[in-house]
Image: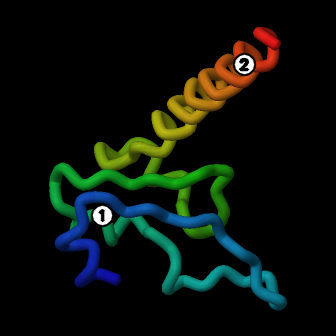
Amino acid sequence: MKEGLCSADVIYMAGYRETADHLPNSNLMLTPDLLSHLHPRAIIMHPLPRGYELPYELDNSVHCAYFSQAENGVFVRMAILQGYFNVIGGR
C-alpha cells in the first residue's frame, strides 16, 4: 500500500466489512505511520461511518477530507430532494 500512497492525490477508504472472525485486516487499514508516505496535498476520503480501516488518530491530519465530504453530502441530498419536490409539487 505504501507504493500506491506515494503517488495518490486522493485516497478513498471504503467501508470495512467484518470477517467471520471479527478481526480487522491490517493490510486494509490506513494507519498514522502511513501518512508520512502521502503527497503533502493528498486527501483522505471515506463515506462514513468508519470501521477499523480509518483510525480516529487521522481525524486531525491535514489530509482528512471525510468530514467535509459528509457535510457536502447532506447539501447534495437536500438539493436532490428539493428538485424532486419541485417536480412533483408542480403537477
Q: Pointer 1: what residue?
A: 35
Q: Quadrant of the N terminus?
A: bottom left
Residue 23 spot, x, y in % from top left: 72, 83
Q: Is residue 15 above or below residue 58?
A: below
**Residue positioned 82% across, 13% down in the render:** 91
Q: Is residue 55 left or right of residue 1?
A: right
Residue sitting at x 65%, y 21%: 83
Instruction: Check the image and report above or below for 23 versus 86.
Output: below
Q: Residue at x 63, y 65 (%)?
A: 15
Q: CA distance from mark 2 to mark 1?
A: 46 Å
Which residue is nearer to you in this view: 7 or 90?
Answer: 90
Image quadrant in which you'd find residue 31 = bottom left
Return the residue at label 2.
Answer: 87
Amino acid on which the number 2 mark rests in the picture: Val
Q: Position of residue 72 (x, y in %)?
A: 51, 31
Sequence-first tag of 2 and 1: 1
Q: Is residue 33 left or right of residue 46?
A: left
Residue lying at the far top in this picture: please name it.
Answer: 90
In the displayed structure image, the side of residue 37 where residue 43 appears, left or right: right
Judge whether 70 appears above or below 13 on screen: above
Question: Looking at the image, which is closer to me, 63 or 74?
Answer: 74
Assign a secondary structure to mark 2.
helix
Name the secondary structure under disc 1. helix
Name the residue rendered at 52%, 54% in the picture: 46
In the image, which disc is placed on residue 63? Answer: none
